[in-house]
Amino acid sequence: MSLIVGQPVVIAVDPQQGGSEEGGGIPATMPGRAERSARMIQIVDRARELGVPVVFIQEVHKRSMVEIGRELDGAEGPHCFEDDPKNDFIDGLDPLPEEFHIKKRRNSAFFGTELEIVLKGYGADTLILFGGLTDVCVHYTAVDAHQHDFRVRVATDAVGGSSQRAHDAALEAIEYLQSESLATTDELIGAMEEWSASAGAASTATGEPAASEAK
């Protein structure tokens, strides 16, 4: 089975900077952050070159935490304050003017946001996810994508969890829902390249512009 079926869209799930005691950023402790960040940038850069839409998701909260709800009932303390520079996207990941930058108040990128409308506009079939945390926002976004009948592909080496154990368990749970859902960054970039080449061949036959030319 091909990793990409139909129209792909890349979803950058909270690729935000590290946490701080003041409540900024994603509270990740899993090692390997620099390597993961480089792969995130690689996915976005290649997606843009190939005409694959990229949607950026950012978790934000007010310092008053009036809308944070039950998020503090678990292990996480205050986090993702919208005015903290550490809550910005990692260096090298800046949404372009024509790309969607969706802010969310809950774990899933679908909950209370316009993401479903955006994906409908793109005609999305396969969603390529990366970011953090693997066991929280990536996991719950993948679950909701599955329940909305999208094909889910998670870049296993471009996501980081609250711990290695939680990261591994989340990936296992995602794969339980969709058996083809896990792949490496290199595999997903290869799949996007195959998709782009196929879309180009199809456009030549029909006279329509190729995906990389139409964006």
Image (cartoon, rainbow, N blue to C red):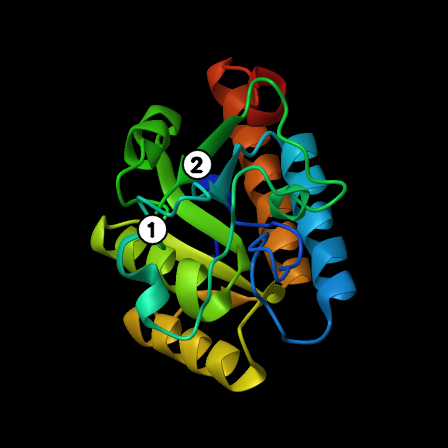
Gap in Å between the C-alphas at discs 2 and 1?
Answer: 13 Å
Q: So how many labels did they put on this image?
A: 2
Write the residue at 29% across / 28% down.
117
Write the residue at 50% across / 81% down.
168
Q: Which of the labelled discs sits on residue 115, or is there none?
A: none
Residue for badge 1: 68
Write the residue at 64% across / 44% down.
193
Q: Nearer the viewer, mark 2 or mark 1?
A: 1
Depth order, front residue of 163/158: 163
Depth order, front residue of 99/51: 99
Quadrant (top left/top right/bottom left/bottom right) for the N terminus: bottom left
Mark found first going from the N terminus, 2 or 1:
1
Q: Please state which amino acid type lies under the numbered disc 1.
A: Ile
SS for tag 1? Answer: loop
Q: Position of residue 33 (x, y in %)?
A: 72, 65
Q: Which of the labelled discs sits on residue 103, or is there none?
A: 2
Depth order, front residue of 158/2: 158
Q: Position of residue 68 (x, y in %)?
A: 33, 51
Q: Position of residue 94 (x, y in %)?
A: 67, 33
SS for tag 2? Answer: strand
Depth order, front residue of 32/78: 78
Badge 1: residue crowd in 10 Å (few <14, some 14–19, many ≥20): some
